[in-house]
Amino acid sequence: MGLTLTEKILSRASGKYVSPGDVVEINVDLAAFHDLTGYHVVEVMEKMGVVKVWDVNRFVLAFDHLAPPPTERAAEIQVGLRKFAKAAGIKFFHDVGDGILHQLLLDHYALPGQVVMAADSHTTTVGAVGAFAQGLGASDIAAIVITGKTWLVVPEPFRIRILGRPGPGVYGKDVALHLLSVFRAEGLNGKSAEFFVEDPGAFPMDYRATVSNMGIELGLDAAMFIPDSETVRHIKERRGVEVKPVTPDPDARYVDGYDVELNRLEPLVATPHSVDNVKSISEVEGLDVDYVFIGSCTNGRLSDIEVAAKILRNGKVRSRCVAIPASREIYIRAMELGYIDTLVRAGCVVTYGTCGPCLGGHFGLVGPGEVAVSTGSRNFKGRMGSPEGKVYLANAAVAAAAALNGKFVDPRKYLT
Ligand SMILES: CC(C)[C@H](C(=O)O)[C@@H](O)C(=O)O
Ligand code: SF4
């Protein structure tokens, strides 16, 4: 019988053939943590009396959540973690400003077929390149950092086909929100999604990363795109590396499946206060918006900044707007292409390489009674600031059109 991508990766990582439901010990190919969770991981390691990393070539540390530190406590935590990085001989250490951990993992470290474990729930993001990637708690990550191993229950493989081509104004975010409207938050618990893209070029890496990123909101154990020509092209272009994709067998068996027809989707928003409270843009059109955040590991990539600039070329923002490319590299590229210039002239505050407002950390929180549009991952009550604020999640085009008009407007009028 053929194997799914999930079974192939976990069989290799455990050294034996695995099936859904098996409890297995696996070798981890890549582990990571950031400033916020890193503090707890190192605390656990210190309690265990082992402050070493099993393989410095397989470990990444990035300061992204509270970076640059907005409080004295955050600064103190970073001082401690820099000491840890030095003592443990960390090779891949990204200090303040390099970028959001998941973006760095996606662009520089994760590869198809790998097992990637990091102390952050959105680790699923690198499923975009076909890695089995999962977020774990501080104690589990501490054990991985020391031993290079962990255990898990093999999830049930679930196949999602992405068919056709998206129309204007429709991106990865809309696929993620559509899936959340169908399966609801946590609705795919215990499953591992394997996304098959019918036309690889029609659904590029940036879009895939958004879908994999929000896979955790569906409760998925992993959200992997089956590596294809786009995966190979993307890794070759970014890293100059020729990868050999790991793919499922043609007769692999899935517990269930679902088809997303891209040409039937329209721009969507998740209304307060849940990721699965999904409505179409037409249902919220005209609603006043006070604040717009364009960024995060969900939607702070070059294509997001590009479409935001395309829309914001049309004038000055009427809502305040903060834009944060997800890494310094994306920032520089966006600068070279003139997007940053456009955003700044339109009245946005632009900074880089931090989670910032996505989790209500800094660089612009939501005030009481305010309506915000965020390209981030979550809109739980109080996540981005005041519990009396209302956060709508959307793609970067919807967000930019809202910033330009001070209210929700269908972005397609700027794109067709
Ligand atoms: C702070 C961190 C633990 C958290 C996560 O795990 O996802 C954050 O990144 C988030 O997006 O809510
Ligand atoms: S950008 Fe948002 S979703 Fe991503 S890691 Fe940071 S806080 Fe979490």
Image (tube, rainbow, N blue to C red):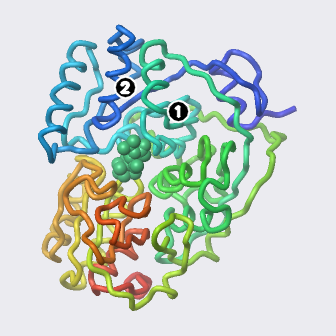
Q: Where is residue 229 in the image (x, y as percent from the top left)?
A: 57, 47
Can residue 124 be spotted in the picture?
A: yes
Q: What element carries label 2?
A: helix
Q: Quadrant of residue 308?
A: bottom left
Please rate how many residues cluster around mark 2, counting C-alpha atoms within 10 Å: few if below 14, some from 14 to 19, many from 20. Answer: many
Give the tally of numbered discs. 2
Q: What element carries label 1?
A: loop
> Which of the two discs, 1 and 2, labels the residue nearer the N terminus?
2
User: In the rendered image of this protein, does residue 102 appear above or below residue 111?
Assistant: below
Q: Where is residue 188 in the image (x, y as percent from the top left)?
A: 67, 51
Q: Which of 228 and 326 is in front in this view?
A: 326
Q: In which quarter of the image is residue 266?
A: bottom right
Report the amino acid beneath label 2. Val
| Residue for point 34% across, 40% down | 101
Q: Position of residue 25 (x, y in %)?
A: 64, 18
Tell me the quadrant of ligand 1: top left
Query: Do labels 1 and 2 touch, CB within 8 Å?
Result: no
Q: In this view, does 116 lie to the left or right of 399?
A: right
Tell me the quarter of the image containing the N terminus.
Answer: top right
Q: In this view, does 65 lie to the left or right of 54?
A: left
| Residue for point 49% across, 33% down | 136
Can residue 416 be spotted in the picture?
A: no
Label 2 sits on residue: 41
Q: How far apart are marks 1 and 2 (CA)?
A: 32 Å
Label 1 sits on residue: 243
Tell me the quarter of the image containing the C terminus.
Answer: bottom left
